[in-house]
Amino acid sequence: MIPEPDVFHRYLGRTRWFGGKGRPFQISDVRRIGEVPTSRESSPVVVIDLVEVAYGDSEGGTEVYQVPMSFYTDPETRLDHAFIGWWEDPTHGWVHAYDALHDREAMDCWLAAFDRAAREPGGNLSDESGLRFHRLPGHDLDLEAHSTLFSGEQSNSSVAYGEDSLMKVFRKITPGVNPDISVHEVLTRTGSEHIAALYGWLDWVDGDPESGADEGSGTILQLAMLQQFLRTASDGWDLALASARNLFAEGDLHAYEAGGDFAAEAERLGVALRDVHGVLAENFPVERLDAAAVRALADGMDARLDAALEVVPELAPHAGTLRAAYDRLRRLDDVAVQQIHGDLHLGQTLRTSLGWKIVDFEGEPAKPLAERLKPDSPWRDVAGMLRSFDYVPHVVERQFAEDQPEGAEQRAYRAEEWAHRNRNHFLTAYADGALDEDQRVLLDAYVADKAVYETVYETRNRPTWVAIPLEAVARIGA
Ligand SMILES: Nc1ncnc2c1ncn2[C@@H]1O[C@H](COP(=O)(O)OP(=O)(O)O)[C@@H](O)[C@H]1O
Ligand SMILES: O=P(O)(O)O[C@H]1O[C@H](CO)[C@@H](O[C@H]2O[C@H](CO)[C@@H](O)[C@H](O)[C@H]2O)[C@H](O)[C@H]1O
């Protein structure tokens, strides 16, 4: 007996990372792709299943999610919160199955396999099922470190091993190369200061592992990555909120006079992003879009606006100014595109004692992989950060308004001051001076496109926040 589809249906519905919770779905397939080698005699069996979900709404389609499980013959009460079900497994008999990410014993096996890979030829440990643990040279893993599952709002699952390493297990799985791994690999090999170094990754080849299937063949599924744990990291979004809060609390001071001014950090972030874009341009192809391709880029923004208007009708009065920004982009005849981050905002930046680090190069999770792998203009990332600097004081204002309705006018002035100051410092540092006219046109178009995307994102995820990007859209062209 294998688990009833209901078991996985119930389990997925309970997780943070399952992206189809609001939609009708059924489990259409469950496939065992391998077992993580055990590290001790007492270790549980740790299997990796791929669970396919078929959607029953008009959009339809399927998605595949990775579910690593630890199997025990008896109930493990310490793992009650991670219980998935019990059934007679075709290979292991009657088992009590738990989400392996919550299980230290299971996570030890995972770490030990990465450790063994470092001593195998080429840093690769593979088994007959097609699971392959890969390691990059340069770091000895701390095998004594205990695993702790992150509890944040994540679309994947991350496990910290003490203060030594961090493993991110990808949940929604798409065949092909995951840019989070490929970009981190290049930035690690080139010694970039602005990322957490990649230590290794796990992938699975559908078929014979000796068959020579490679990253380009589309038969690889990338399942997890192991990277440096940034011990001294503080989240860039939280730091920026604290800075804006501090300014709001000061009745008479300007941003540059108040303690906690963020401008120097914004500047450092600009330099860090420029540096990362430079390394990516040196190590991934750079293309120059001709006039037709630039028009297609602008058409894409127009199409996104059309789709957004269906979801957010309040955009309608601003459609003219938005389309004018895309028209100005349409008239450019030479735009360079390259590998970029693709989903950059302050929540993807971490301030460590050694400077700013940028994380999560996966691109926008909602976009199909093929689109996420396409080169794009670096100004998309810059626009993402400028939008984030706009969000910060408006989120703080929402918090103040609840407790302190008086003083809203003064705070609105402060909000604009904070955003303006930090956008300028970031942008000037990134561009190393003023922008030329074409750069300004490109940036304005990407900022408009991102703000439109955000109105949809907020409507679907945090409807009470939608005024933040809507007000930004209204300011465009005002
Ligand atoms: N190398 C790291 N060291 C410490 N914390 C990290 C590291 N990488 C990411 N984080 C933290 O984990 C959170 C989630 O990471 P992220 O890569 O954005 O996951 P997801 O793809 O699920 O969104 C980040 O917001 C950050 O706070
Ligand atoms: O981090 P994700 O890849 O999941 O990105 C999505 O969620 C972000 C919010 O967590 C969202 O970002 C928007 O809100 C941020 C504040 O919470 C703000 O800093 C960003 O500028 C704003 O875009 C992001 O758009 C979405 O793709």
Image (tube, rainbow, N blue to C red):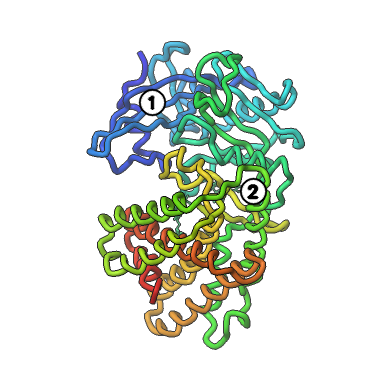
User: 320 left or right of 266?
Assistant: left
Which image quadrant: the C terminus?
Answer: bottom left
Mark earlier in primary sequence (1, 2) = 1
Q: Quadrant of residue 455?
A: bottom left
Q: What residue is rendered at 49% in x and 22% in y?
A: 71
Q: What residue is rendered at 62% in x and 42% in y?
A: 284
Q: Position of residue 19 (x, y in %)?
A: 38, 41
Viewer-nearest residue: 36 or 391: 391
* CA gap, disc 1 and disc 2: 48 Å
For numbered disc 2, what is the local secondary structure?
helix
Q: What residue is rendered at 42% in x and 70% in y?
A: 399
Amino acid type indicated by mark 1: Gly
Mark 2 crowd level (few <14, some 14–19, many ≥20, 10 Å Cα): some
Q: Position of residue 291 (x, y in %)?
A: 47, 53
Position above or below: 412 against 121? below
Position above or below: 334 against 315? above
Q: Is mark 2 within 8 Å of ligand 1?
A: no
User: 344 left or right of 404?
Assistant: right
Position above or below: 256 against 438? below
Mark 1 crowd level (few <14, some 14–19, many ≥20, 10 Å Cα): some
Outermost residue, bottom side: 252
Q: Which mark is residue 85?
A: 1
Q: Which residue is mark 2?
A: 281
Q: Quadrant of residue 430?
A: bottom right
Q: Is mark 1 within 8 Å of ligand 1?
A: no
